[in-house]
Amino acid sequence: MSDKVKMIVRIIPKRTMQNILKDIRNHLQNLTVTKDSHGYTVTTGKGLIVLKAMNGNRDYLTRWHPKLLAAFNG
């Protein structure tokens, strides 16, 4: 059995994704948001990727750790 977490994939509108990243920066100090030429990556202090957002024309193609996604789905 693998100990890798299955990431959840979602397409999210740009405005919504920008608000999510803003909330992560402002309220979750244990996570780091970094921007590169392809989009955004959110990592833990231990280097675990919990969110990856690839830039598209109107949306971001995102991969979420299930616990982080649950926090934003309510």
Image (cartoon, grey):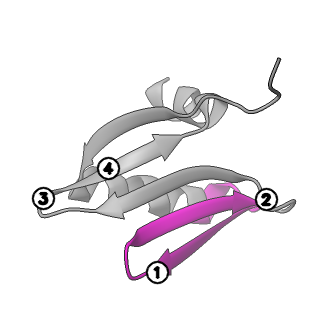
* Mark 2 Cα shell of 10 Å, populated few (<14), some (14-19), many (≥20): few
- The residue lying at 74 percent from left, 62 percent from top is 29
> SS at mark 2?
loop
Q: Which residue is mark 1?
A: 36
Q: Earlier in the sequence, mark 4 or mark 2?
A: 2
Residue at which label 3 appears: 58
Residue type of the residue flagged with mark 1: Asp
Disc 4 and disc 3: Cα gap in Å?
10 Å
Q: Residue at x 50, y 55 (%)?
A: 52
Discs 1, 3 touching: Cβ within 8 Å: no
Residue bearing mark 2: 30
Tell which of 48 and 68 is nearer to you.
Answer: 48
Secondary structure of residue under mark 1 = strand
Q: Amino acid at mark 4?
A: Leu
CA–CA distance in space, label 1 to label 2? 20 Å
* Residue 18 visible somewhere in the drawing: no
Name the disc covering residue 61, or none.
4
**How crowded is the residue under tag 3: few (<14 C-alpha within 10 Å), some, or many (20+)?**
few
Q: Residue furthest front?
A: 1
How far separated are the C-alphas under marks 1 and 3?
18 Å
Q: Which residues are magenta?
A: 25-44
Question: Relative to residue 3, is residue 7 drawn left or right?
Answer: left
